[in-house]
Image (spheres, rainbow, N blue to C red):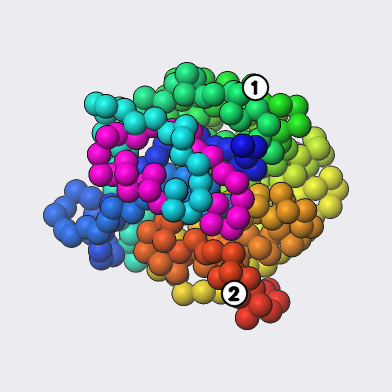
Amino acid sequence: MSFDIVTMGPLLCEIMRKELDKPLDRPADFSGPYPSGDTAIMLNAAAKLGARCAMIGVVGNDGFGRCVTDRLKESGADCSMVRVHPEASTGVAFVCYYSDGSRSFLYHVHHAAPGMLTADDVDLDKIRDAKWLHVSGFALSTNQNSADAVYKMVKGASEKTKVCFDPNIRPEALSVEEIKELCHPVLERADVIFPSRGEAMMFTGAATDDEGCRQWALEGKIVVLKNGAAGCRIYAGDEVIQVPGFQVEEVDPTGAGDTFCGAFLTAMIEGKSLTECARFANAAGAMSVRKRGPMEGAPSREELEAFLKEAGSPEA
């Protein structure tokens, strides 16, 4: 089977505080588990929207592993390249939310099943003809074995296969120079980049994200700067397109940017214009925040089309 999108990365379950302003160093109630992981959230969204998707990763032989893989399968994603580790536990992310909109995460990833991913988990024969490979900085920064698996996937792909890169990497974990070195092989190969605010500046050394995105665009890349509820801005050659977002009642913002990426790629595969891709993705991202849990609000194709029809022109 030829896939539209193949990705890899940490497969997690998320456990979140039920109430605001309950820090992770104090007793309080949690809810979950919710299937999670940045690339998995992206793939779940794309699969629900009709793309042929495949996941590469490692989970434990436990309930959390089944929680995330069952969700991906239900959405239509291929999980035949997800390895079940007989001894390691599935990755977990604990999260709490604060009244000011900030979040705090505690990850059990590096020494759990996601940290067991190696280059041997990449079957090039199965992915060589994929239309797109999606890479995130989170997958690259898990450990060196995970980075090597990403490099093998990207270098072993067909010349016809396109690569998109979502930086999604924490400068608190690594220095800026370490991040640049780690991501360079992927950035060099990337056809599309999905930076969030501050990331284009960090990677290019530009004074602003706008300058950084323009620099990448002049190198021949399509750059989609994610701006949350404000929508996104596309840089292609010397063209800049601002596409406003949709106003919704936010319940849980986690995963909105990943859902956005999955929808944008799906729209590109279908041959939509960049503006149409952005509006499609803005809608999917907006819809995703209306439910608790990073995958719970990802829309089906029918739900997304109904949302767009009802919304009409997005608000500026």
Which residue position holds label 2? 307
Asked if the residues shown at circle 2 and circle 1 are in contact, with their CB atoms under 8 angstroms apart, the answer is no
Asked if residue 247 is positioned above or below residue 296 in the image, the reply reads below
Q: Is residue 29 left or right of residue 232?
A: left
User: In the image, what residue occupies the spot 84% across and 45% down?
Assistant: 237
Extreme front residue here? 1
**Mark 1, residue position:** 155
Q: Quadrant of residue 202?
A: top right
Amino acid type, residue under disc 1 in the picture: Lys
Q: Amino acid at mark 2?
A: Phe
Q: Residues within 10 Å of mark 1 (few under 14, many from 20)?
A: some
For residue 290, what is the image quadrant?
bottom left
* Residue 240 as seen in the image, left or right of residue 286: right
* Quadrant the N terminus occupies: top right
Which residue is depicted at the point 65% across and 22% down? 155
Give the total of numbered labels. Answer: 2
- Across and down, in percent, residue 147 comes to 50, 24
